[in-house]
Image (cartoon, helix red, strand yellow):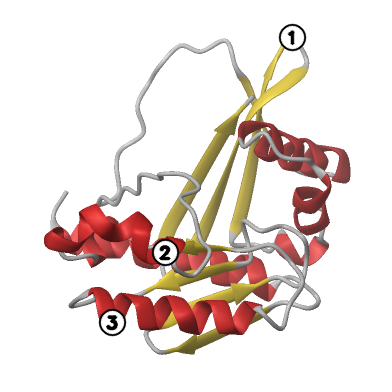
Amino acid sequence: MLKSEIFASNQQFIDAWSYFTSTCPKGEVLEAYELVITWSGTDNFFINAIFLTKPVRDEAELETKIKVAVDYVKKRKQPWWMIVAEDSIPEFLSPQLDEVFARQGLVPLLRMTGMATEQLLPTRHHSKLNCVSVNNLEMRRAVADINAISYNLPPAPFREILELDQFWQETVFGTLGFVENQPVSTAITFLINDEAYFQTYTC
């Protein structure tokens, strides 16, 4: 992936999380010190995120930004995580990355892969999935539960956000995949700044 595509993917990630947060009654989105903070005010740590938005030059700069993040969350009691694109870190610093975060009490959680591309033409394929648009509360709960299962987490924090009417605005499209009337996969597409951000989960 080209550098421009990497940072486009990262920016879409930030924009999507900012949208999530904006739909939460106690949500807030802040930008400071080349960080973006998306804080939902809920116990869903996936949405309580702090993003590094620009490449850092060295260990000292990275540690300063981590300290800013930690200082922010000290005032709050909800779980959270910090998201750092590997391409934002100088190659020479990568071997020490875990150690730098550990000094502030943070440990690796998971690795994610972002993607970005121009609009693709739909493909034809044969699938046993019966895909249905999300259009009621029961289906929203199924979307939340599949999200939770895919991360081996409890469903309540996901339901708290995905059940909200204000989450499902006209630029958000949800789909459930059914096998024998049982929901087994889900996808959510957001139109943000004239671009589509797509997430998919299976259980």
Mark 3 Cα shell of 10 Å, populated few (<14), some (14-19), many (≥20): few
Quarter residue 93 falls in: bottom left
Q: Residue at x 66, y 58 (%)?
A: 45
Marks 2 and 3 in Cβ contact (< 8 Å)? no
Q: In this figure, which residue is indicated by the disc labeled 2?
A: 101
> Could you tell me the amino acid type at mark 2?
Phe
Residue 108 left/right relative to 131: left
Q: Is residue 133 something that shows in the picture?
A: no
Q: Which residue is mark 1?
A: 180
Distance in Å between CA atoms under marks 2 and 3: 12 Å
Q: Give the answer, above or below, for where 189 lies relative to 76.
A: above
Q: Nearer the observer, disc 2 or disc 1? A: 2
Q: Earlier in the sequence, mark 1 or mark 3?
A: 3
Q: Residue at x 81, y 41 (%)?
A: 141
Q: Which mark is residue 132?
A: none
Picture coordinates of residue 89, whole percent (x, y): 23, 65
Q: Position of residue 96 (x, y in %)?
A: 26, 58
Which amino acid type is marked by label 1?
Answer: Glu
Q: Is residue 12 left or right of residue 200?
A: left
The residue labelled by disc 3 is 61
How many numbered circles are shown?
3
Between discs 2 and 3, the one toward the N terminus = 3
Q: Is residue 82 left or right of residue 149?
A: left
| Camera sees residue 191 | yes
Q: Foreground residue, 156 or 95?
A: 95
Q: Which residue sits at x=69%, y=62%?
A: 79
Image quadrant where one finds the C terminus: top right
For residue 13, side relative to residue 152 (left or right): left
Q: Are marks 1 and 3 in contact (CB under 8 Å)?
A: no
Residue farthest along the bottom direction in this orientation:
32
